[in-house]
Image (tube, helix red, strand yellow):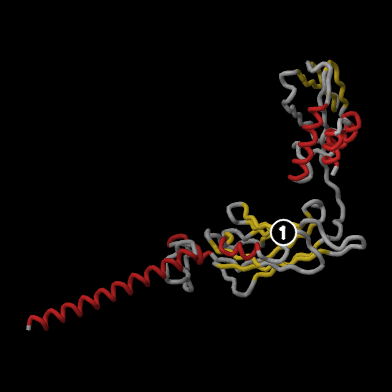
Amino acid sequence: MTSYALLCLTERGGISDAVPVTNWLFSQQNANGGFASTSDTYAALKALTEFSKGFEVQNRNTDMNIQYEFLGTVRRIKVSSESATTMQKRILPEETREVKIRATGSGISVIEVGYQYNLNVTAAWPSFVVNPQVTKVSDSNHMQVTVCAHYIEKTNKTGSNMAVMEVNLPSGFTANQDSLPALRRHRGVKRVDTEKSDTKVVLYFDSLSKREVCPTIEAFRTHRVANQKPAPVLVYDYYDQSSRARSFYDVVPATLCDICEEEDCPDDGCPDRPTFPNFGSYAFREAYYAESTGNTNGITVCLLLSGLLSLFAVRHLQ
């Protein structure tokens, strides 16, 4: 919201009034130049760009020396007109607790000091409830997971903003593209995307309330991976990503005998291993059998017709 306020001030010509707003925006910027989310980064950079266009400087010939001191060490950074748009970054030792900065010269530049630290705190009560369940029709080659989620109502709020559900698939599985249109028609779903080569399904909701939604994601095993670990499901508020909840689910794990070939299999063999060739893809195996069956029937029909034609020719000659 602050970024949009800065845009309004800039368009109205209130550049001097926008300086405190600009300073606050810079204080929210992270060490990589971004902000809390992708949408926040876009809006903030757009507002700062428009502000810089309207900001008048009498002398734009930048020639500055930045001196910074830490742990008894003094370093300098040179900023000139040629390097005015280049970000210069210095990483200080972890034990640094104080930095003194002194600037001399002429021009304008932005100096930021970023820091990170860990706090031992107890997480707040989640804003959502998310419960993924793998259906009974799932096996080591095919999976259906139903993810039920709803918003935890608060005293002054009965629903979330736009909500996002990220369903990560177990290793070796990719989403069934044919099932995505049904997800897009699910109640409340506005958009469905896949990421990371179809190994992650992302659903966008207008809002989540106390009424539970339960979309089902379908996936097939496309890569040979055994002993998969639990996969996470994350639900969060798009505009307030501190409001989130996460849960994990287990898939029917593939064993080494499901994916091995010849010398890669255990020394004692795999007595329960299927007799069909292992091509590493459940969908490919199904196609293999369907094609093989079709060819066999075709050969049988051809042989039968050939036999009947031969018999007819012999009788005709007699």
Pick the residue in front: 86 or 49: 49
- In the image, taking residue 105 as reference, residue 289 lies left or right, namely left
To which residue does mark 1 refer? 165
Residue at the image position 46 percent from the left and 71 percent from the top: 274
Residue 147, x across and y down, in percent:
70, 66
Residue at the image position 64 percent from the left and 61 percent from the top: 229
Q: Secondary structure at mark 1?
A: strand
Is residue 191 shown above or below 95?
A: below
Instruction: State which quadrant residue 172 falls in.
Output: bottom right
Pick the residue in front: 251 or 256: 251
- In the image, taking residue 298 as reference, residue 56 lies left or right, namely right
Pick the residue in front: 182 or 10: 10
**Quarter in which the N terminus is drawn:** top right
**Quarter in which the C terminus is drawn:** bottom left
Is residue 294 shown above or below 72?
A: below
Residue 158, x across and y down, in percent:
86, 63
Residue 9, x across and y down, in percent:
87, 35
How many labels, in total?
1
Q: Residues within 10 Å of mark 1 (few under 14, many from 20)?
A: many
* Residue farthest left in this picture: 318
Identify residue type, mark 1: Met
Residue 156, x across and y down, in percent:
92, 60
